[in-house]
Image (spheres, grey):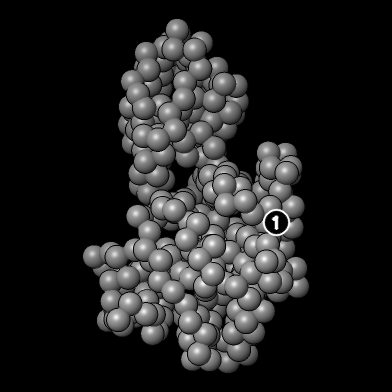
Amino acid sequence: MQSFTAIIPAAGKGVRLMPFTRNIPKTMLCVAGKPILGHILDQVKELGIRRVVLIVGHRKEAIVEFVRQRYPQLDAVFVEQPEPRGLGHAVYLAKDVVSGPCFILLGDTIVDGDLRPMVFGGQNAVGLKKVDDPRRFGVAKIEKGRITGFVEKPDNPPSHWALIGAYSFLDSKQLFEALAEVIASGKTVKNEIQLTDALSVLLQKGVSIAPVPMNDWLDCGTVEILLKTNQMLLTRHAAVPEQAELNNRIIPPCWIDPSAQVSGCTLGPYVSVAYGAKLTNCRLEDAVVGPQTELANKTALHVILDKFGSK
């Protein structure tokens, strides 16, 4: 069986996360001590996938450097999306470097759940989660356990099953051909080419796509969701160096990078401190401290703090 290639669209500017995303891509913002993209690539590695195609755009150099330095074992290919034209367009740009089966994970989305049944279930599949208000999402119409349609951000949703941003296809050529049809038709939603429209084309051609329920997902598109993601990850992966325990009051769960310098601080609960940060006499709770950020005599609650600003 041909091995899977992971496609990770990561070209977004992250307008809702300004000023943090002015100088770095949204997917490079840190939660639980590492960039969002790091958590996603860890999931890809755990699945045994070694070839990754990243669709990059805004401040792409930061992504290229991070992946090459921190994930040298991956066969990483970078494809540029010159202008934001939607998720469907981003995925379509991978057509010249991807063949065979592919797995798509959005570059600003951390999925909570076992991805193996989706990727290795021997079928085309999409990850779904039942939500109270699906109007903000792509939505799957399901009848007798089968997906019969897709619609993007509908005013009158056909179900409460939202697409979470994880997709698996046995034949990427079929997907790219469906995307080409959507692009040729000129159809857009809010001026963007949507992946859900290509999924609809596949269904119309008789290609089956299986629904795979997931526990949850966090799209990391706002400060509030980033902090929620940080909390969720810290409950599972807290880690504090011994030296930081000696010189500070740590209220778990927290995550402090071994390279961070932390002195005279009270941190936690739910505080993550990324690599190269320097904190002195700070009191932080429910906070994310970004890489190489220097703080002194700072008291803060429910915030992101980094060298590009705080909110």
The N terminus - image quarter: bottom right
Q: Which residue is mark 1?
A: 51
Q: Is residue 125 visible?
A: yes
Considering every residue shown, the one lying at the far left of the view is 132
State the image quarter where residue 70 is shown. Answer: top right
At horizontal 46% and vertical 25% (from top left) the residue drawn is 239
Position of 303 relative to 16 (above/below): above
Considering every residue shown, the one lying at the far top of the view is 246
State the image quarter where residue 87 is shown. Answer: bottom right
Is 262 on the left or on the right of 141, as rendered? right
- Three-letter amino acid code at the position of disc 1: Arg
State the image quarter where residue 233 is shown. Answer: top left
**Closer to the camera, 149 or 154?**
149
Position of 298 relative to 59 (above/below): above
Is 118 on the left or on the right of 83, as rendered? left
Q: Characterize the local packing of mark 1: few (<14), some (14-19) or many (20 or more) Cα atoms within 10 angstroms.
A: many
Is 33 on the left or on the right of 77, as rendered? left
Expressed as whole percent of the image width and height from the top left, the position of residue 167 reads: 51, 67
